[in-house]
Structures are given as structure tokens and as C-alpha cells.
Amino acid sequence: MGLRIWETDPEAEPKPRQKFTSDIVGRFRSGYQVNGRPAALEQWRVTSGDPDVADTIRAMFGGDAAQTWDTQGEDSLEVFTEAPRVKVVLDGPSAIRQEMILWGRNTMIRRCDGVEQTMDEDKGKPCECPASYQDRKDAAKSGRGCAPSITIYFTLADDPDLGRFRFNSGSWSLVRDIVTAEAQLAAIDGPAEAWLGLEVVEYEAGGKKRRFTKPVVDVIGAVK
């Protein structure tokens, strides 16, 4: 017979461990929220719903102990690591998925591949976004056009058995850089090792020094 101590203090009763309902065990994130405003990071933040995964991430990449954060998703634990880049394994070109999305208030208004719309009811129709790269950026910034959504699926090179992770980004710089990575993965045509990193870019504008962090994918070569 089990102990009945929780009957006298139900609020303290341990909750069942939360498991992911998909095959994704965690997410790598390049930012977080500060008072409801987005803030960029220079080291990876990893979220997961599995305490064992969170503990392993901390052991591998350093950082503070896992803590809970306010989310509606299953990845309720977060680890702010000390790693600006990690070595990952990408399972060929299909590990990278790209699309352009125009969001309303928590609702997808339009989705395209840059040339044709891809939502069911409008599939095949010409994209309504501007043709040039800069005009696309301007339209997305003003809320009139689709913005990039790039998702990368991978395992960790040093512990592939830990499970699959994903990283999602709306970075316009990644839209440019990912072309090279995709070509390299297509040439390898199989599992490949790569560095998934956060690169700090510094520049001067209006007489002021500025900096931002951009995600980068550097393909190393085929898995040996």
C-alpha cells in the first residue's frame, strides 16, 4: 500500500511527469521575454517538458538549473545555457523547412513559398507579397506581408540518443544564409554534422554602435 500523506496536503502532491506528445524532446531558442517584450540571447536557451532532457542539456552546455516558465506548450522547463553554438546532426535537406507566413491575432492569414500561396483554400494562387527581398522585409515589418518561418530539426552530435530537437526562426539573415547550408546538405545527401550557432553582429548606425544576434548554420560534413 502506498503512503497517504498527500491526502492531508493535496497541494504538495507531486505532479505526473509531463511527456511530449510528439517526437520532439525540446526546443532551442535564441530569445526570451522580458516584461512581455522579446529579448535576444547570445547563448542558447533550451526548453523541454522532460526533466531528464533538461538536466542533460545543462550538463552538456552549462548554465543554471532548469526552471519553469510561463508557457501554454509542453516544454515547461527552460535552461539558459552557456553555449553560443552546438554541434548537431541534420538528417539531410529535409531537416530544414521554410515557409512565409502572415499572422493576424493568433491566426494565420496567409502562407506562401515566396511565389505561390500554400494554404488549402488558396493553394497555387500567386503570392501577394512583393517580389523584391527588401520590399518583402518592409511589407512584413508593416504587417502587410508574410515573414519567414524557418524550422530546423536535429539531434545533438554528442548525444543523438537524447532525441530530436527543433529550432524555429523568423530571421531574414537566416533566409539568406540557409541557402548555402541547403546546397551542402543536398550534396552530402545523408546525415550531416553542422554547427548551430548564435553569431553576434556589431555595426554603427546614426553615430551609435549597435549589435544584434543572428542564428547561423555551418555544415561541417557527412556523419562518419
Image (tube, rainbow, N blue to C red):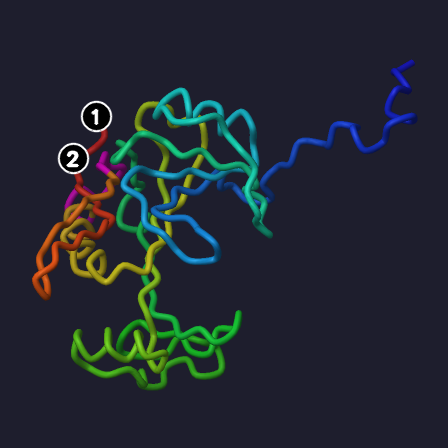
Q: Position of residue 106 (x, y in %)?
A: 53, 69
- Residue 86 vs residue 6, the one in the foreground: 6
> Which residue is at 44% across, 51% downward?
34
Q: Position of residue 20 (x, y in %)?
A: 58, 40
Stretch in magenta:
186-195
Residue hosting label 2: 221
Query: Identity of the amino acid at label 1?
Result: Lys
- Residue 112 vs residue 37, the one in the foreground: 37
Quarter of image, res 1: top right
Circle 2 crowding by C-alpha within 10 Å: few under 14, some 14–19, many from 20: some
Q: Pointer 1 and pointer 2: residues touching (CB < 8 Å)? A: yes
> Quick check: 215 above or below 179?
above
Quarter of image, res 164: top left
Residue 177 part of the magenta segment: no
Q: Position of residue 166 (x, y in %)?
A: 40, 45
Answer with left or right where residue 54 lies relative to residue 206: right
> Quick check: 196 above or below 7?
below
Tell me the tag on residue 224.
Answer: 1
SS type, badge 1: loop
> Which residue is at 42% across, 25% downward?
58
Answer with left or right where residue 2 lies relative to residue 191: right
> Quick check: 153 above or below 135?
above
Query: Identity of the amino acid at label 2?
Result: Gly
Circle 1 crowding by C-alpha within 10 Å: few under 14, some 14–19, many from 20: few
Q: Quadrant of the C terminus?
A: top left
| Number of numbered discs visible in the structure rendering | 2
SS type, badge 2: strand
> Which residue is at 35% across, 62% downward?
149
Tell me the tag on residue 208.
Answer: none
> Which residue is at 42% across, 78% downward?
110
Q: Position of residue 141 (x, y in %)?
A: 30, 74
